[in-house]
Image (cartoon, rainbow, N blue to C red):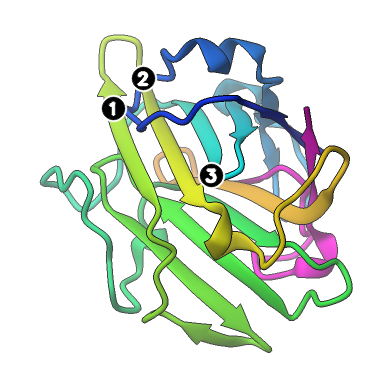
């Protein structure tokens, strides 16, 4: 489970997780291989979540040895075609708000160079033209060997109805680190595909 704590104000992402609200978020370690559940403590990625009536916020802190991306920094660039962003380093978020409709979910990806991707999946059909209007910022700290991704996604893009205290959505978090040949999942899918919604874990909303 990833627990999202309610916040009383909205703020723009800067890729630093310095807003005071992040201090009240419970970190989830993203460190298990999706295929078999093997723990990779050297890549343990801390993920936090917050929410307001307008946005879902996500924060990833990713230790690394070497970055594998598409090179030139492209902050804020959203990929609008089936580009293989997942062939390099990324963090990802898949969410299905209705546990009874696991054939409907949305996917989000963010890379260390600032590129990003969002899409909607309907009955195994990928809709790359869809846009969530998400906002994000990535910062790479090469001295500490950590890259940070801070995101906010409009609630209206995630679900038709706003969550309340105790609402539970099916969701999974992922990270790909090519240098370490790591494919991590918050809840391992136990196969080679991230697109296994029946193996998603939970995103839980709390006040």
Q: Of residues 179 and 86, which is closer to you in this image? A: 86
Q: CA distance from mark 1 to mark 2?
A: 7 Å
Q: Which residue is mark 1?
A: 139
**Residue 2 in the image, given as x and y percentages of width and height:** 75, 36
Rate crowding at label 3 as few (under 14), some (14 to 19) or many (20 or more) other CA atoms within 10 Å: many
Q: Inspect the magenta stretch and tell me whether residue 198 lies in it.
A: yes
Instruction: Write the start and end of the magenta stretch as one range.
Output: 183-207
Q: CA distance from mark 3 to mark 2?
A: 18 Å
- Mark 3 lies on a secondary structure that is strand
- Residue shown at 56% from the left, 61% from the top: 156
Rate crowding at label 2 as few (under 14), some (14 to 19) or many (20 or more) other CA atoms within 10 Å: some
Q: Which residue is mark 2?
A: 16
Q: Relative to residue 158, is residue 20 drawn left or right? A: left
**Residue 139 in the image, given as x and y percentages of width and height:** 28, 27
- Mark 1 lies on a secondary structure that is strand
- The quadrant of the picture occupied by the C terminus is top right
Q: Which residue is mark 3?
A: 55
Which mark is nearer the camera, 3 or 2?
3
Which numbered circle lies on residue 109? none
**Residue 53 in the image, given as x and y percentages of width and height:** 61, 43
The picture quadrant where one finds residue 148 is: top left
| Residue 182 visible in rendering | no
- The quadrant of the picture occupied by the N terminus is top right
């Amino acid at each position: 489970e990833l627990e999202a704590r309610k916040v009383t104000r909205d703020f723009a992402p800067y890729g630093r997780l310095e807003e005071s609200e992040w201090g009240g978020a419970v970190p989830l370690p993203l460190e298990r291989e999706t295929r078999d559940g093997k723990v990779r403590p050297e890549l343990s990625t801390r993920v936090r979540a917050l929410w307001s009536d307008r946005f879902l916020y996500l924060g990833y802190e990713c230790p690394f040895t070497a970055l594998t991306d598409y090179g030139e920094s492209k902050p804020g660039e959203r990929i609008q075609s089936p580009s293989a962003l997942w062939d390099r380093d990324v963090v990802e978020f898949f969410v299905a708000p209705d546990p009874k409709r696991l054939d409907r979910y949305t996917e989000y990806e963010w890379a260390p160079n600032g590129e990003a991707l969002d899409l909607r999946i309907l009955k195994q059909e990928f809709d790359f033209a869809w846009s969530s209007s998400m906002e994000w910022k990535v910062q790479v700290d090469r001295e500490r060997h950590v890259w940070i991704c801070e995101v906010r996604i409009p609630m209206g893009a995630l679900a038709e109805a706003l969550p309340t205290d105790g609402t539970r959505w099916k969701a999974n978090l992922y990270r790909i680190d090519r240098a370490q040949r790591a494919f991590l999942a918050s809840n391992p899918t136990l196969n080679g595909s991230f697109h296994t919604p029946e193996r998603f874990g939970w995103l839980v909303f709390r006040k």
